[in-house]
Every structure is written in structure tokens, then in C-alpha cells.
Image (spheres, rainbow, N blue to C red):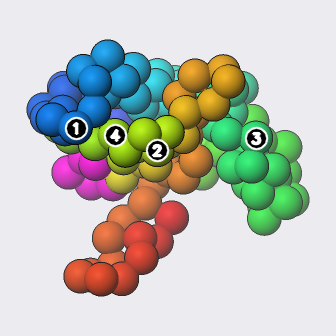
Amino acid sequence: MHKTVPAAFALVALTACAPAGAASRVATTASLFASALHRQDGSAACALLTDAARSSLENDSGQACDKAVLAVKSDPSGVQVQVWGDEAEARASHDTLFLDRTAKGWRVRAAGCKPQGKDVPYQC
């Protein structure tokens, strides 16, 4: 795990098409997730995952979420947030988080994602 995850994100840009409040909430969720990883607090990080992401992580790793999530590499410094309805992206210098708006608020759908090139899906 990358040990230089900042405790808070520096919100660099918000999309014009999304309400500023939504982008701010996405940035807050992303910051809380990164902070939990930095503190090695797997329970707090898992609480910020979507149900599907939590299930997938547990199934893929064979471990409980609070242990498996600690393998996620995330260093989202200088984050740029884009929101499209109920989906969002928090792009940073080293990785990208994808988030969904849920009944519990914004939750991380995918973390530690890296671009693979133009017109190629991210590797998460």
C-alpha cells in the first residue's frame, strides 16, 4: 500500500454540469476513503464502498472486506471531481476512484484505478 495518502484531498476542479454540493460530497467521500486506507482502518474504508464493491472484493480475495481493502493502492492527491447524475469520478495524480450515489450517500465503486491508454478501460 502506498503510504503517502494524504489525510484530505485538495479539491482542484468541479464539473460545471454538476451541482457544487454533489462534487463536494464526492470529494469528501474520496477523502474519507483515502484517510481510512492511510490509517489502515479497513472497517472505515469498507463502510465507504458500495455493496457490490464490498462483495466483489471479498469474493475475489477470499478475505473479509476489512482485511482485503487494505491492499488497495490509492494516493489521490490533487483530485479533480466530475459528477454525472448518480455516478462520479475522483481523478488524482496517481489513481482514480469511481463513485456511485446510493441511499447511504456517495460510495466508492472502484478504487486504485489506473488508466491503460486512450479508449481503453481503467485497470482497478
| Most frequent secondary structure within the magenta stretch | loop
| Distance Cα–Cα, label 2 vs label 3 | 15 Å
Query: Label 1 belongs to which residue?
Result: 17
Query: Which numbered dot is residue 83?
Result: 4
Q: Is residue 3 visible?
A: no
Q: Residues within 10 Å of mark 2 (few under 14, many from 20)?
A: some
Using residue 56 as the reference point, say whether residue 73 is left or right of it: left
Q: Classify 35 as above or below 49.
A: above
Q: Quadrant of residue 60?
A: bottom right
Query: Label 3 belongs to which residue?
Result: 51
Q: Which type of secondary structure does the marked residue at label 2 adopt?
A: strand
Q: Nearer the viewer, residue 45 or 102?
A: 102
Query: Which numbered dot is residue 68?
Result: none
Q: Residues within 10 Å of mark 4 (few under 14, many from 20)?
A: many
Q: Are marks 4 and 1 in contact (CB under 8 Å)?
A: yes
Query: Which numbered dot is residue 87?
Result: 2
Reading the chain from its start, which is encountered first: label 1 or label 3?
1
Reading the chain from its start, which is encountered first: label 4 or label 3?
3
Q: Which type of secondary structure does the marked residue at label 3 adopt?
A: helix
Q: Are marks 4 and 2 in contact (CB under 8 Å)?
A: yes
What amino acid is labelled 4 in the image? Val
Q: Position of residue 44 (x, y in %)?
A: 64, 22
Residue depth check, mark 2 versus mark 3: number of the one nearer the observer: 2
Q: Are marks 4 and 3 in contact (CB under 8 Å)?
A: no
Q: Are marks 2 and 1 in contact (CB under 8 Å)?
A: no
| Distance Cα–Cα, label 1 vs label 3 | 27 Å
Region of the chain picked out in magenta, as a range: 91-95
What amino acid is labelled 1 in the image? Cys
